[in-house]
Image (cartoon, rainbow, N blue to C red):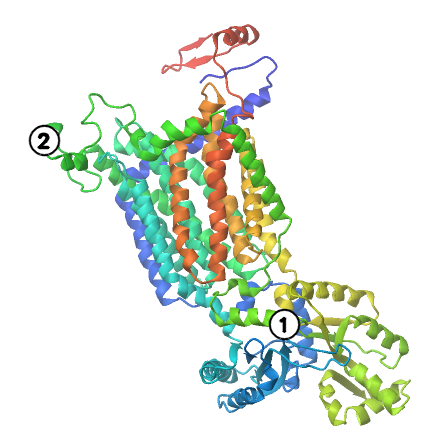
């Protein structure tokens, strides 16, 4: 053991350094023993994972069940809107307003909805016969009761803004609500009615070519959400085949002895069977599948194959003259420390995403499943793949062909064979007069990095362009981060060619002038006859188009010349005159009376508000909600506002950003706590900077690519944290610990050591994403964009930005020049303790 003490160096600094060395060597020793254990019992470590996969794999087929409650998945779990819905539903049950225009104020329930669209330049109002035929066909359906409750017009032409008379319209929307009353039998009937309704609309579309029909039912959103999984099945298989092919080719060499194509193949299969086992555990614990879980195979593959390729690189760095068991142990000692750290960070970040702080159930379920996948992934890599590495090492030591598993013939035998046979069976040494010190340097990626890329990227003339490139990257990232928008629109999770998306686009185009109908519920007794109260109600409803029994009643009193300035007159005329008139009878369901003796009281009432909106209706509805809620606390009138869409919008932005903030805080805290303990403090410092740069880059660029902050993109951002650490950590730690003469030589050495594994993994990862581009689904488009940016930004930092920037900044490297060394000897006191094999023999210099 040897250490250097400079004058003024504190004992605490030396203590921290020794502690870091002890921890590092302790971890390496543990991984070395783990590698020895696997190499001595390869059959056991091969069999146990295989048996677990068989056991849990059957549960995937037997217990598979899709999640049917879409609101529970994507709406915030804890929101004020759900409490408001419960209160509104207790005051005004849905079955009491089954025949009214706005019976979906509490919950949409079961319904069928159709938009009839006329050709361009035509007036839908002139095609009344086709509209009525469609309406009668729906009412004649026998699978349940339906009620025509109203219609809306879209693409309206109003020639005179004063009388608001409609001259023409382009589209008309009709909604049919079913009366299920919460009964299971009625609900099944309603489900069948909706299916028949959609079939009927398709049939009518074929019969009426002059009018386009776009239908929607209550189950359409769930059906089109689950449709993504069906559409993506074949594409995921194609993705797997591409990854298998890439991993196999990138693990091959011209040297038939040292080439490891089957190890690349088996490494990918190792990740696959670990994911199948994790899925089996998920379904055994009563988990329900949803389309957001499509990202887990890609997330697990990106981390698992990194461990596979790093182990292969670690094997190449071991000495060939060692027994294969010792080489496996050395590879574990070299690689598994970093892989253990990155796997732990994966588990921590996704574990925080699965915590109660996460308010989106889809994110929570995904993170829970991802934690199980990471644990099994780590176990399968060091056990199942480690056993495969042992058998491959044994074949190599016994000089067996890496593909055909036959003995490699001698040089004399090969000389008598054709050229193609020599090419296939040559081990790379038989055409040279001497053995290379490291024959694995002939791997094509290793050769490219060593002979070409390392010299080019560290060229002094290239560095200014890299700095300019990074400034451009940072500028676009910062610009994108300023334009982040939340993705509360559930359409972003549906299949893009589905009826729900077509209907939503059409509705946005023709019916975006007004917001959804908002229920305004006064849930406490109020003196409606009081002039001050009346003025407060008018002020609260200002800016809205109000459908209110209060305004109608005040107008009725004014026209009838009736005075109702006190409680008894107000309620008496309301009950005995106003509500008995046919044109006002529908207001009975909007007022709740209570009777104490002979006296009646109004204990609660309901009004309807509609806001004028622009094209971005969703954003303006959220602003309306944020404006009205504080007024319920500031005003003397106690009220709540509610619409079913509020359940999805309420604090959605905070709900989806919280998991990535917590995960980022967890990573930062973990790296800070290990700042003075693990390997080198500057390594953690550079890692924090690199991860932050990649994370902000992905966030900004995905915003510029029209990706909103929904549950899929937020999961990808959590993954970006880990993916960047996975690839940057080995490169940075090797750099800070390197002892070459200059920083440039150190970064070249780091790229040569880890660049091959990084390039193999990121290339396989990006190629595996390509089939997602051909799945017609908004969910997979988001997944593709985010993961493509994750892989690209990580690749950019590992091979372009860090190799250049690390040559400018600390840690500094020692320049071993004679003059400097002579001057340093004069200034430094050197203490060196050299421990020989005999512990009693100590020499002090």
Q: Are marks 2 and 1 in contact (CB under 8 Å)?
A: no
Q: Is residue 558 above or below residue 674?
A: below
At numbered mark 1, what does the secondary structure look like: helix, strand or loop?
Answer: loop
Residue in the foreground of this view, choosing between 40 and 110: 110
- Of mark 2 and mark 1, the one earlier in the sequence is 2
- Disc 2 marks which residue? 413
Instruction: Say whether residue 31 is visible.
Output: no
Q: Quadrant of the N terminus?
A: top left
Residue 555 coordinates in the image, percent (x, y): 83, 85
* Residue 43 to residue 839: above or below: below
Residue occupying the point 41% across, 47% down: 765
Instruction: Find residue 452 and report its horizontal and vertical position in percent.
Output: 38, 29
How many numbered marks, from 0 up?
Answer: 2
Query: Foreground: 65 or 218?
Result: 218
Instruction: Say left or right for 523 vs 474.
Output: right
Is 3 left, or right, of 545 in this rendering?
A: left
Q: Which residue is drawn at the image coordinates 29% and 38% (left, top)? A: 39
Q: Tell me the residue at 40%/39% (across/down).
A: 759
Q: Residue 133 — which label?
A: none
How many residues crowd mark 2 within 10 Å: few (<14), some (14–19), many (20+)? few
> Percent x, y for residue 114?
55, 79
Asked where in the image residue 250 lies, by quadrant, the reply is top left
Residue for point 44% across, 82% down: 206
Q: Observer-nearest residue: 158 or 534? A: 158
Q: Secondary structure at mark 2?
A: helix
Pointer 1 local density, CA inside 10 Å: few below 14, some 14–19, many at least 20: some
Image quarter of residue 730:
top left
Residue that sits furthest to the front in the current view: 121
The residue closer to the viewer here, 393 or 12, is 393
Expressed as whole percent of the image width and height from the top left, the position of residue 802 reads 50, 33
Which residue is tagged 1?
A: 644
Give the CA distance from mark 2 to mark 1: 80 Å
């Amino acid at each position: 053991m040897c250490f250097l003490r400079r004058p003024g160096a504190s004992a605490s600094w030396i203590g921290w350094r020794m502690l870091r060395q002890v921890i590092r060597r302790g971890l390496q020793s543990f991984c070395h023993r783990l590698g020895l254990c696997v190499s001595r019992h390869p059959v056991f470590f091969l069999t146990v994972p295989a048996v677990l996969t068989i056991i849990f794999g059957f549960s995937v087929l037997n217990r598979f069940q899709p999640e049917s409650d879409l609101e529970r998945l994507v709406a915030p779990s804890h929101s004020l809107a759900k409490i408001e819905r419960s209160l509104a539903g207790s005051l005004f049950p849905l079955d009491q307003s089954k025949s009214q225009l706005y019976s979906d104020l509490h919950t949409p329930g079961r319904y069928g909805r159709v938009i009839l669209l006329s050709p361009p330049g035509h007036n839908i109002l002139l095609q009344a016969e086709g509209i009525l035929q469609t309406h009668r066909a729906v009412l004649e359906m026998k699978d349940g009761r339906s009620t025509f409750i109203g219609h809306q017009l879209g693409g309206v032409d109003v020639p005179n803004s004063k009388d608001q008379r409609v001259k023409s319209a382009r589209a008309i929307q009709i909604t049919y609500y079913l009366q299920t009353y919460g009964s299971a039998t009625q609900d099944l009937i309603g489900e069948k009615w909706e299916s028949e309704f959609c079939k009927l609309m398709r049939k009518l579309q074929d019969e009426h070519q002059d009018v386009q029909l776009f239908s929607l039912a209550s189950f359409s959103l769930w059906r089109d959400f689950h449709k993504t999984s069906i559409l993506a099945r074949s594409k995921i298989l194609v993705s797997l085949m591409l990854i298998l092919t890439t991993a196999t080719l990138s693990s091959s060499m011209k040297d038939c002895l040292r080439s490891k194509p089957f190890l690349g193949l088996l490494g990918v299969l190792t990740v696959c069977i670990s994911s199948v086992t994790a899925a089996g555990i998920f379904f055994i614990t009563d988990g329900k599948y949803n389309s957001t879980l499509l990202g887990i195979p890609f997330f697990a593959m990106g981390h698992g194959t990194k461990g596979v390729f790093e182990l292969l690189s670690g094997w190449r760095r071991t000495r060939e003259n060692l027994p294969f068991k010792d080489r496996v142990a050395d590879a574990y000692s070299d690689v598994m420390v970093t892989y253990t750290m990155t796997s732990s960070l994966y588990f921590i970040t996704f574990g925080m995403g699965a915590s109660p702080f996460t308010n989106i159930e889809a994110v929570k379920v995904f993170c829970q499943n991802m934690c199980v996948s990471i644990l099994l992934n780590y176990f399968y890599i060091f056990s199942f793949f480690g056993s495969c590495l042992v058998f491959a090492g044994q074949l190599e030591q016994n000089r067996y062909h890496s593909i055909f598993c036959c003995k490699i013939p001698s040089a004399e035998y090969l000389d008598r064979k054709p050229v193609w046979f020599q090419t296939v069976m040559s081990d790379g040494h038989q055409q040279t007069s001497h053995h290379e010190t490291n024959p694995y340097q002939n791997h094509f990626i290793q050769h490219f990095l060593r002979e070409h890329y390392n010299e080019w990227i560290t060229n002094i003339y290239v560095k200014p362009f890299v700095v300019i490139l990074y400034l451009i990257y940072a500028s676009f990232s910062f610009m994108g981060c300023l334009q982040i928008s939340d993705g509360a629109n559930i359409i972003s999770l549906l299949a893009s060619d589905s009826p729900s998306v077509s209907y939503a686009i059409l509705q946005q185009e023709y019916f975006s002038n007004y917001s959804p109908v908002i229920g305004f519920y006064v849930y406490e007794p109020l003196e409606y006859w009081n002039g001050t109260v009346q003025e407060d109600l008018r002020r609260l409803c200002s800016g809205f188009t109000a459908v209110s029994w209060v305004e109608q009643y005040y107008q009725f009193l004014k026209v009838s010349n009736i005075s109702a300035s006190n409680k008894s007159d107000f309620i008496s005329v309301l009950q005995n005159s106003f509500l008995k008139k046919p044109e006002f009878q529908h207001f009975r369901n909007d007022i709740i009376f209570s009777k104490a003796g002979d006296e009646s009281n109004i204990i609660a009432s309901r009004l309807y508000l509609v806001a004028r909106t622009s094209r971005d209706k969703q954003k303006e509805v959220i602003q309306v909600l944020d404006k009205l809620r504080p007024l319920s606390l500031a005003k003397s009138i106690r009220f709540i506002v509610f619409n079913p869409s509020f359940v999805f919008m309420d604090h959605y932005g905070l709900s989806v950003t919280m998991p990535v903030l917590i995960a980022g805080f967890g990573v930062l805290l973990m790296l800070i706590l290990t700042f003075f303990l693990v390997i080198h403090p500057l390594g953690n410092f550079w890692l924090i900077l690199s991860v932050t740069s990649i994370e902000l880059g992905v966030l900004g660029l995905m915003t510029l690519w029209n990706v909103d902050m929904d549950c899929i993109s937020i999961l990808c951002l959590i993954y970006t944290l880990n993916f960047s650490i996975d690839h940057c950590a080995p490169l940075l730690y090797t750099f800070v610990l390197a002892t070459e003469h200059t920083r440039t030589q150190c970064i070249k050495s780091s790229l040569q050591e880890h660049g091959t594994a990084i390039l193999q993994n990121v290339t396989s990862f990006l190629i595996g994403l390509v089939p997602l581009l051909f799945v017609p689904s908004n969910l997979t488009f988001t997944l593709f964009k985010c993961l493509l940016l994750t892989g690209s930004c990580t690749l950019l930092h590992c091979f372009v930005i860090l190799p250049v920037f690390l040559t400018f900044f600390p840690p500094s490297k020692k320049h071993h020049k004679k003059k400097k060394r002579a001057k340093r000897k004069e200034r430094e006191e050197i203490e060196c303790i050299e421990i020989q094999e005999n512990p009693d023999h100590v020499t002090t210099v």
